Image (spheres, grey):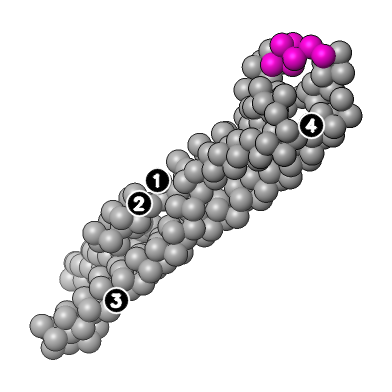
Protein backbone atom coordinates (compact mmCIF):
# COMPACT_ATOMS: atom_id res chain seq x y z
CA UNK A 1 0.00 0.00 0.00
CA UNK A 2 2.81 2.38 0.90
CA UNK A 3 4.60 1.51 -2.34
CA UNK A 4 1.46 2.26 -4.30
CA UNK A 5 1.06 5.68 -2.65
CA UNK A 6 4.68 6.53 -3.42
CA UNK A 7 4.15 5.64 -7.08
CA UNK A 8 1.04 7.82 -7.25
CA UNK A 9 2.86 10.75 -5.58
CA UNK A 10 5.84 10.41 -7.92
CA UNK A 11 3.56 10.31 -10.96
CA UNK A 12 1.64 13.38 -9.80
CA UNK A 13 4.87 15.28 -9.16
CA UNK A 14 6.16 14.37 -12.62
CA UNK A 15 2.89 15.52 -14.17
CA UNK A 16 3.08 18.85 -12.36
CA UNK A 17 6.69 19.34 -13.43
CA UNK A 18 5.81 18.51 -17.02
CA UNK A 19 2.90 20.97 -16.99
CA UNK A 20 5.08 23.68 -15.48
CA UNK A 21 7.77 23.10 -18.08
CA UNK A 22 5.19 23.24 -20.86
CA UNK A 23 3.76 26.47 -19.45
CA UNK A 24 7.20 28.06 -19.25
CA UNK A 25 7.94 27.04 -22.83
CA UNK A 26 4.63 28.47 -23.99
CA UNK A 27 5.34 31.73 -22.17
CA UNK A 28 8.78 31.96 -23.71
CA UNK A 29 7.32 31.31 -27.15
CA UNK A 30 4.67 33.96 -26.63
CA UNK A 31 7.31 36.45 -25.56
CA UNK A 32 9.45 35.55 -28.55
CA UNK A 33 6.56 36.07 -30.95
CA UNK A 34 5.38 39.28 -29.33
CA UNK A 35 4.62 42.31 -31.49
CA UNK A 36 7.57 44.52 -32.39
CA UNK A 37 7.36 48.15 -31.40
CA UNK A 38 7.56 50.78 -34.11
CA UNK A 39 11.04 51.83 -33.03
CA UNK A 40 12.29 48.23 -33.08
CA UNK A 41 10.80 47.76 -36.53
CA UNK A 42 12.48 50.92 -37.82
CA UNK A 43 15.84 49.81 -36.38
CA UNK A 44 15.49 46.53 -38.29
CA UNK A 45 15.73 48.54 -41.51
CA UNK A 46 19.35 49.49 -40.84
CA UNK A 47 21.22 52.63 -41.84
CA UNK A 48 19.11 53.19 -44.96
CA UNK A 49 16.29 54.33 -42.66
CA UNK A 50 18.30 57.47 -41.75
CA UNK A 51 18.05 59.16 -45.17
CA UNK A 52 14.46 57.97 -45.49
CA UNK A 53 13.64 59.55 -42.13
CA UNK A 54 15.30 62.82 -43.23
CA UNK A 55 13.34 62.80 -46.49
CA UNK A 56 10.09 62.23 -44.62
CA UNK A 57 10.87 65.13 -42.26
CA UNK A 58 11.67 67.44 -45.18
CA UNK A 59 8.48 66.38 -47.01
CA UNK A 60 6.22 66.99 -44.03
CA UNK A 61 7.89 70.34 -43.29
CA UNK A 62 7.48 71.56 -46.88
CA UNK A 63 3.87 70.39 -47.08
CA UNK A 64 2.87 72.18 -43.86
CA UNK A 65 4.88 75.34 -44.58
CA UNK A 66 3.65 75.69 -48.17
CA UNK A 67 0.06 74.92 -47.19
CA UNK A 68 0.03 77.70 -44.59
CA UNK A 69 1.75 80.11 -47.01
CA UNK A 70 -0.70 79.42 -49.83
CA UNK A 71 -3.68 79.67 -47.50
CA UNK A 72 -2.50 83.07 -46.26
CA UNK A 73 -1.95 84.23 -49.83
CA UNK A 74 -5.43 83.07 -50.84
CA UNK A 75 -7.15 84.95 -48.03
CA UNK A 76 -8.37 88.05 -49.81
CA UNK A 77 -11.78 89.61 -49.15
CA UNK A 78 -14.24 89.41 -52.00
CA UNK A 79 -14.80 93.13 -51.54
CA UNK A 80 -11.14 93.95 -52.31
CA UNK A 81 -11.50 94.44 -56.06
CA UNK A 82 -14.85 96.17 -55.53
CA UNK A 83 -13.12 98.60 -53.16
CA UNK A 84 -10.32 99.17 -55.65
CA UNK A 85 -12.84 99.88 -58.40
CA UNK A 86 -14.75 102.37 -56.23
CA UNK A 87 -11.60 104.25 -55.25
CA UNK A 88 -10.27 104.27 -58.81
CA UNK A 89 -13.55 105.65 -60.16
CA UNK A 90 -13.34 108.49 -57.62
CA UNK A 91 -9.70 109.09 -58.56
CA UNK A 92 -8.49 108.32 -55.04
CA UNK A 93 -5.21 106.64 -55.97
CA UNK A 94 -3.75 107.15 -52.50
CA UNK A 95 -6.71 105.41 -50.93
CA UNK A 96 -6.33 102.55 -53.40
CA UNK A 97 -2.65 102.20 -52.45
CA UNK A 98 -3.56 102.16 -48.75
CA UNK A 99 -6.17 99.46 -49.38
CA UNK A 100 -3.52 97.36 -51.14
CA UNK A 101 -1.10 97.89 -48.25
CA UNK A 102 -3.74 96.64 -45.80
CA UNK A 103 -4.05 93.35 -47.75
CA UNK A 104 -0.67 91.53 -47.68
CA UNK A 105 -1.48 89.16 -50.54
CA UNK A 106 -0.01 88.51 -54.00
CA UNK A 107 -3.09 90.01 -55.61
CA UNK A 108 -2.81 93.23 -53.60
CA UNK A 109 0.87 93.57 -54.51
CA UNK A 110 0.05 93.12 -58.19
CA UNK A 111 -2.67 95.78 -58.08
CA UNK A 112 -0.46 98.16 -56.10
CA UNK A 113 2.27 97.85 -58.74
CA UNK A 114 -0.27 98.69 -61.44
CA UNK A 115 -1.52 101.72 -59.50
CA UNK A 116 2.03 103.02 -59.11
CA UNK A 117 2.48 102.78 -62.89
CA UNK A 118 -0.65 104.82 -63.70
CA UNK A 119 0.29 107.50 -66.20
CA UNK A 120 2.27 105.13 -68.37
CA UNK A 121 0.80 103.41 -71.43
CA UNK A 122 -1.59 100.57 -70.61
CA UNK A 123 0.80 98.10 -72.24
CA UNK A 124 3.56 99.06 -69.79
CA UNK A 125 1.19 98.85 -66.84
CA UNK A 126 0.04 95.41 -67.94
CA UNK A 127 3.66 94.25 -68.29
CA UNK A 128 4.48 95.51 -64.78
CA UNK A 129 1.48 93.70 -63.30
CA UNK A 130 2.41 90.49 -65.13
CA UNK A 131 6.02 90.68 -63.93
CA UNK A 132 4.92 91.07 -60.32
CA UNK A 133 2.52 88.17 -60.84
CA UNK A 134 5.37 85.95 -62.07
CA UNK A 135 7.44 86.82 -59.01
CA UNK A 136 4.52 86.07 -56.68
CA UNK A 137 3.86 82.75 -58.41
CA UNK A 138 7.52 81.80 -58.02
CA UNK A 139 7.25 82.56 -54.30
CA UNK A 140 4.16 80.41 -53.98
CA UNK A 141 5.80 77.49 -55.80
CA UNK A 142 8.99 77.71 -53.73
CA UNK A 143 10.24 74.25 -52.62
CA UNK A 144 7.21 72.43 -54.07
CA UNK A 145 9.43 70.92 -56.77
CA UNK A 146 11.53 69.36 -53.99
CA UNK A 147 8.54 67.18 -53.13
CA UNK A 148 8.58 65.84 -56.69
CA UNK A 149 12.26 64.96 -56.32
CA UNK A 150 11.66 63.22 -52.98
CA UNK A 151 8.74 61.30 -54.48
CA UNK A 152 11.20 59.78 -56.97
CA UNK A 153 14.17 59.30 -54.63
CA UNK A 154 12.45 57.69 -51.61
CA UNK A 155 11.24 54.50 -53.38
CA UNK A 156 14.69 54.15 -54.96
CA UNK A 157 16.31 54.29 -51.52
CA UNK A 158 13.82 51.66 -50.39
CA UNK A 159 14.92 49.50 -53.32
CA UNK A 160 18.55 49.97 -52.24
CA UNK A 161 17.51 48.65 -48.82
CA UNK A 162 15.91 45.66 -50.56
CA UNK A 163 19.21 44.87 -52.31
CA UNK A 164 21.10 45.21 -49.03
CA UNK A 165 18.65 42.80 -47.37
CA UNK A 166 19.15 40.22 -50.12
CA UNK A 167 22.93 40.56 -49.79
CA UNK A 168 22.60 39.96 -46.04
CA UNK A 169 20.60 36.80 -46.65
CA UNK A 170 23.12 35.31 -49.09
CA UNK A 171 26.05 36.32 -46.90
CA UNK A 172 24.49 34.61 -43.87
CA UNK A 173 23.83 31.47 -45.90
CA UNK A 174 27.38 31.41 -47.31
CA UNK A 175 29.04 31.85 -43.92
CA UNK A 176 26.93 29.29 -42.05
CA UNK A 177 26.34 26.83 -44.86
CA UNK A 178 22.73 26.51 -43.75
CA UNK A 179 19.47 27.79 -45.22
CA UNK A 180 17.06 28.45 -42.39
CA UNK A 181 14.95 31.11 -40.69
CA UNK A 182 17.92 32.34 -38.65
CA UNK A 183 19.90 33.00 -41.82
CA UNK A 184 17.17 34.82 -43.78
CA UNK A 185 15.22 36.66 -41.06
CA UNK A 186 17.64 39.57 -40.65
CA UNK A 187 17.89 40.23 -44.37
CA UNK A 188 14.13 39.93 -44.82
CA UNK A 189 13.55 42.53 -42.10
CA UNK A 190 15.89 44.96 -43.83
CA UNK A 191 14.35 44.23 -47.22
CA UNK A 192 10.70 44.61 -46.24
CA UNK A 193 11.05 47.50 -43.78
CA UNK A 194 13.09 49.70 -46.13
CA UNK A 195 10.82 48.93 -49.09
CA UNK A 196 7.72 49.87 -47.08
CA UNK A 197 9.35 53.01 -45.66
CA UNK A 198 10.51 54.15 -49.10
CA UNK A 199 7.05 53.71 -50.57
CA UNK A 200 5.35 55.51 -47.67
CA UNK A 201 7.69 58.51 -47.90
CA UNK A 202 7.32 58.56 -51.69
CA UNK A 203 3.53 58.49 -51.46
CA UNK A 204 3.48 61.34 -48.91
CA UNK A 205 5.74 63.50 -51.10
CA UNK A 206 3.81 62.61 -54.27
CA UNK A 207 0.42 63.47 -52.76
CA UNK A 208 1.78 66.65 -51.19
CA UNK A 209 3.32 67.78 -54.49
CA UNK A 210 0.11 67.43 -56.50
CA UNK A 211 -2.11 68.77 -53.71
CA UNK A 212 -0.04 71.94 -53.31
CA UNK A 213 0.26 72.33 -57.08
CA UNK A 214 -3.54 72.28 -57.38
CA UNK A 215 -3.83 74.92 -54.65
CA UNK A 216 -1.32 77.16 -56.45
CA UNK A 217 -3.09 76.71 -59.80
CA UNK A 218 -6.40 77.78 -58.27
CA UNK A 219 -4.78 80.85 -56.73
CA UNK A 220 -3.08 81.72 -60.04
CA UNK A 221 -6.46 81.54 -61.79
CA UNK A 222 -7.93 83.99 -59.27
CA UNK A 223 -4.95 86.33 -59.63
CA UNK A 224 -5.25 86.33 -63.43
CA UNK A 225 -8.96 87.13 -63.26
CA UNK A 226 -8.30 89.98 -60.84
CA UNK A 227 -5.48 91.32 -63.03
CA UNK A 228 -7.83 91.36 -66.03
CA UNK A 229 -10.47 93.12 -63.92
CA UNK A 230 -7.91 95.73 -62.85
CA UNK A 231 -6.90 96.42 -66.44
CA UNK A 232 -10.60 96.79 -67.33
CA UNK A 233 -10.91 99.40 -64.56
CA UNK A 234 -7.99 101.37 -66.03
CA UNK A 235 -9.45 101.21 -69.53
CA UNK A 236 -12.87 102.37 -68.29
CA UNK A 237 -11.22 105.37 -66.71
Few, some or many residues within 10 Å of mark 2 (<14, 14–19, 20+): some
- As rendered, which of 114 and 18 lies closer to the eye? 114
- Mark 2 highlights which residue? 53
175 in the magenta segment: no
Few, some or many residues within 10 Å of mark 4 (<14, 14–19, 20+): many
Label 4 to label 1, Cα distance in Å? 41 Å
Image point (31%, 71%), residue name: 160
Image point (60%, 39%), residue name: 131
- Highlighted range, magenta: 91-97
User: Residues at badges 3 and 4 in contact (C-beta under 8 Å)?
Assistant: no
User: Residue 75: horizontal and vertical position, in percent?
Assistant: 69, 28
Q: Which mark is first along the chain, 1 or 4?
A: 1
User: Residues at badges 2 and 1 in contact (C-beta under 8 Å)?
Assistant: yes
**Furthest residue toward left:** 175
Q: Is residue 79 left or right of residue 201?
A: right
- Mark 3 highlights which residue? 163
Amino acid sequence: MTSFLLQVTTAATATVDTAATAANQAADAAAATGDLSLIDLILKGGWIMVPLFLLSFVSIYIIIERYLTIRRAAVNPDSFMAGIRGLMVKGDLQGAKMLCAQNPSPLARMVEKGIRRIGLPLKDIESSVENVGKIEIARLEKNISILGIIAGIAPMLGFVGTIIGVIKIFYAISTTGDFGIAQISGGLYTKMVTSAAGLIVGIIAHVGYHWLSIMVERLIFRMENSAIEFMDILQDN
